[in-house]
Image: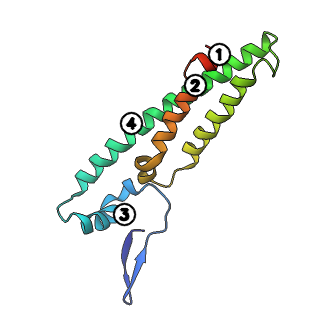
Amino acid sequence: MAGVGEYEGATLTDHWVRSPVLMLKDGCLACHQKHDANVNEQQLKDRVEEIRDPHWKLRQDAMTALMGLIEDLKAARAAGKSDADLKAALYLHRQAQFYLDFIEAENSGLLPCAAGVSPHSRRIDQFLSPGPDRGA
């Protein structure tokens, strides 16, 4: 939590919930400089973009693939396929939707992106990729 000042010897912190990227100096730099005294605000911004941009692309690709799967399921149902016929595809849809929901819900900051959310995006892609066990 970013310190925004002091009052009677106590540190006041900012409790406005928003991206720490909007306040790198106050929200990130102090802690990062404890580990590397030479790190600066621009280096942190560059690192954020290095992590965030590939994560966002994976998320977008997963969302596009999931929406395609939903459209394919709708078309299959319109063509008369039963739930039994679509059992494997419906199972994969539930799995992919779970992982995408996790990615959307895990919005506590940049570090989760770097540590684990992007692998979930790749997992969604695995569920949605054509393959011999996926009916393609």
Which residue is rendered at x = 38% and y = 38% of the image?
Answer: 53
- Of all residues, the one furthest to the left in this rendering is 38
Which residue is under mark 4?
A: 54
Q: Secondary structure at mark 3?
A: helix
Task: Classify mark 3: residues with Cα within 10 Å, few (<14), some (14-19) or many (20+).
Answer: some
Nearest the viewer among 59 and 115 is: 115
Amino acid identity at mark 4:
Pro
Nearest the viewer among 135 and 35 is: 135
Which of the numbered marks, if any, corresponds to residue 27?
Answer: 3
Amino acid identity at mark 1:
Gly
Which residue is rendered at x = 71% and y = 24% of the image?
Answer: 88
Q: CA distance from mark 4 to mark 2?
A: 19 Å
Which residue is rendered at x = 71% and y = 19% of the image?
Answer: 73
Which residue is under mark 1?
A: 135
Which residue is rendered at x = 46% and y = 41% of the image?
Answer: 118
Earlier sequence position, callout 3 versus callout 4: 3
